[in-house]
Image (cartoon, grey):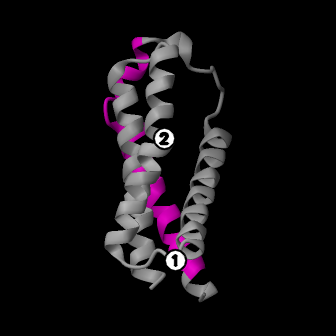
Amino acid sequence: MNWTHFALATLAAGIAGSFTDWFFTGILFHDKYVAYPEVWRKRTSEGSTIAWATLLGFVTAASFMAACVVFEIHGYSRAFLFAAICWIMAPLPFTIMNALYIKLHPLVAVAHALGWLARLIVAAIAAGWLLN
């Protein structure tokens, strides 16, 4: 395994994933977040929350790359398939369960689910490109 390619794939997926998060959880259906304001934590500054969420996005990217290496997933088609399986396995059901038990506007749940799919697709693109 080429560690430079691994690091570049993780960095690229982490940065691009931050932009997908910004779009899907910050812009798409933004007005629906205030449908139930009591659900969201009151913070004086969102900076540390955003920093932690961004860091965890890089952990997701590194984990995806590591799984691709361990399971010998090479090329775009296998990486996309792996991303779809990962999405169906964890973030999609988790997001749906959250929407069932937590008072969230349904479009917020849709945005979060699509955001996870986008993040995993971006990771698949980086893996297909750099981990060959």
In this rendering, the label closer to the viewer, 1 or 2? 1
Label 1 crowding class (10 Å Cα cut-off): few <14, some 14-19, many 20+? few
The secondary structure that dominates the magenta segment is: helix
Membership of 100 in magenta stretch = no
Q: Which of 37 and 91 is in front in this view?
A: 91
Picture disc at residue 91: 2
Q: Earlier in the sequence, mark 1 or mark 2?
A: 1
Q: Kindly identify the amino acid type of the residue bearing the numbered disc 2.
A: Pro
Residue 103 percent coordinates (x, y)? 48, 12
Residue drawn at point x = 38 percent, y = 49 percent: 117
Query: Where does the magenta region start and end?
Result: 6-35
Q: Can residue 34 be seen in this view?
A: yes
Picture disc at residue 72: 1
Assign a secondary structure to mark 1.
loop
Corner quadrant of residue 70:
bottom right
Corner quadrant of residue 127:
bottom left
Residue lying farthest to the bottom in this orientation: 2
Residue lying farthest to the front in this orientation: 71
Residue 71 percent coordinates (x, y)? 55, 71
Q: Kindly identify the amino acid type of the residue bearing the numbered disc 1.
A: Glu
Label 2 crowding class (10 Å Cα cut-off): few <14, some 14-19, many 20+? some
Assign a secondary structure to mark 2.
helix
Residue drawn at point x = 59 percent, y = 59 percent: 58
Q: Is residue 22 visible?
A: no
Q: Is residue 74 above or below residue 55?
A: below
Would residue 94 appear left or right of 59 to someone viewing this image?
left
